[in-house]
Amino acid sequence: MAISQKISALIENQFPDFYKEEGENFILFLKAYYEYMEQTGKLTHEMHNLLTYKDIDLTTTEYLEYFRRTL
């Protein structure tokens, strides 16, 4: 899995066919959960962007403000 690929797109393929037939709501719930977590500001989105955030020219204003207050 490439780091830029979204986890929510992979959820359906992680379960055996039994879940696709008998547990469709469970799979839909997990997919919705990961879609939510991939939104800007949520944990999964932030983890995928850690390498970008370490560059002072590409980081977010929230991190700049944190560093300004800390240092």
Image (cartoon, rainbow, N blue to C red):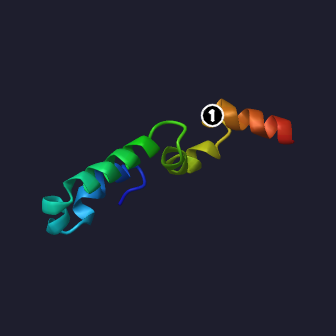
At 16% from the left edge and 61% from the top edge, which residue is drawn?
A: 22
- Residue 32 placement: quadrant: top left
Residue 17 pos. (x, y %) = 14, 66
Q: Nearer the viewer, residue 11 or 53?
A: 11
Q: Nearer the viewer, residue 53 or 46?
A: 46
Figure disc tally: 1
At 21% from the left edge and 59% from the top edge, which residue is drawn?
A: 23
Q: Quadrant of the C terminus?
A: top right
Q: Quadrant of the N terminus?
A: bottom left
Residue farthest to the top, as pictured: 61
- Residue 13 placement: quadrant: bottom left
At 42% from the left edge and 41% from the top edge, which residue is drawn?
A: 36
Residue farthest to the right, as pictured: 71
At 36% from the left edge and 53% from the top edge, which residue is drawn?
A: 7
Residue 46 pos. (x, y %) = 54, 45
> Disc 1 residue type?
Thr
Q: Which of 13 and 58 is in front in this view?
A: 13
Q: Check disc 1 and report the residue beneath it.
A: 60
- Residue 68 placement: quadrant: top right
Residue 53 pos. (x, y %) = 61, 43
Residue 57 pos. (x, y %) = 64, 35
SS at badge 1: loop
Q: Residues within 10 Å of mark 1 (few under 14, many from 20)?
A: few
Instruction: Answer left or right for 41 relative to 35.
Output: right
Q: Is residue 35 above or below residue 25?
A: above
Instruction: Answer left or right for 21 relative to 44.
Output: left
Instruction: Answer left or right for 37 relative to 21.
Output: right
Instruction: Answer left or right for 36 relative to 15.
Output: right
